[in-house]
Amino acid sequence: MEIAVISGKGGTGKSSVTAALASCAGEVVLADCDVDAANQYLLFMPEIEEEQVYVSGYKAVIREDVCDNCGLCMQYCRFQAIHLVNGQVRISETACDGCRLCARVCPAGAVEMHECNRSRMVSGSFRKGRMVYGRLAPGEENTGKLVSMVRNKARELAAKSGIPHILIDGPPGIGCPVISSITGTDLVIIVTEAGISGFHDLKRALEITGAFQVKTWVLINKYDLNPEWTESISEYCQEKEITVAAKLPFDPLFTDAMVHQKSVIEWAPEKLVSRQLSNLWEMITANAEMNENGLSAGIHR
C-alpha cells in the first residue's frame, strides 16, 4: 500500500506527521518526495547504500576561446540570461532556461549545452526500514521527474525487501511534484492548519486529489489554536464527504522530538498526539486490509 502525505501549503506539520507514521509501522519504505527541501534524512539519519545522478536539464555555457562577442545570442534570448560583462558575453546559470536557441543562432558555434547533473537520488536503510529521497540542487528545475525516480526506487526496495507499505512525504502545494507524488497511490492524507490560509490551500489540494480520483483523508493540525476555522474545515469536509481522520492539538513536543532527531512517537509515545497518530496508522492499515479483502472501507473519495 502506498500512502502519500501532502499539504496545500508549507509549514502545516506534514513532515512531522509522516515521520510519526513511519515510526508506527513495523517496517516501512519511507520516500521523501519533497525534493526541493528533503528533511526526513536529517531526522532518521539513514545508512546510505546507493546514490544516483539526476539530470534535470541543460544549461548554456559560453566557450570564451571561440566567442567573438557579437551579441547575437543576447538579442534572441527571451529569458534575459545573457549579458555583456566587461565586454565579454556571459550567461547566467540561474536565469538560463536551457532552450538551446542561443546555441543554434551563434554564428561562431561558441555556445555549448551542459548537463545539470548536481541533483541526486539517495537510498539506504534506517531504523524503521528503507528510505529513499531526492535532493534537487539549487536552481535546478523540479518538474516531478525526480519525484517519479524516487517513487520507482521505493517500489523496487519494497518489492526486494518484502515491505508492504510505502509512505510518501510529498511536497507542499499543487504543482507537478505533488501530482507525481500522489498519482497511483492508495491513500492521500492532506495535513492542514486551522486558519484561512490553511483552509484555502486545503481546498486546492482536494481539487487535485479529486481530479485524480485518489482516496483522500484530511488531518487538521493545531486545531485548538483556532476552533472556529477547525469547525469550518470540518463542515466543509463533511459536505464534500471527505473523512477528517484526525485533529491534532498544538504541542511543542513535535519540536522537542525534531531537535533530538526523533519522531514525536519515538520521543513521547505516551502523550496524546502520539496516541492519536498511532490510532491514525491503525486506521490506515485497517483500511488497507479491507481493500485487500474486497470490502467497503466506508471512506469517501
Image (cartoon, rainbow, N blue to C red):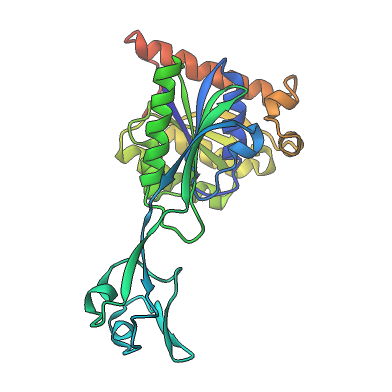
> Horizontal placement of 221 versus 242: left or right?
right
| Identity of the residue furthest to the front in this view | 65
> Is residue 20 depicted above or below 181 in this figure?
above
Q: Residue at x 54, y 52 (%)?
A: 197
* Viewport quadrant of the N terminus: top left
Residue 241 visible somewhere in the drawing: no
Image location (x, y in percent) of residue 240:
39, 35
* Image quadrant in which you'd find residue 270: top right
How many marks can you see?
A: 0
Image location (x, y in percent) of residue 61:
38, 71
| Identity of the residue furthest to the top in this view | 293
Image location (x, y in percent) of residue 21:
58, 25
Q: Residue at x 51, y 58 (%)?
A: 138
Image location (x, y in percent) of residue 65:
38, 80
> Is residue 255 depicted above or below 58 in this figure?
above
> Nearest the camera: 209 or 165?
165
> Nearest the camera: 99 or 287?
99
* Image quadrant in which you'd find residue 38: top right
Residue 39 visible somewhere in the drawing: yes
Q: Residue at x 77, y 36 (%)?
A: 256
* Viewport quadrant of the C terminus: top left
Q: Residue at x 70, y 30 (%)?
A: 262
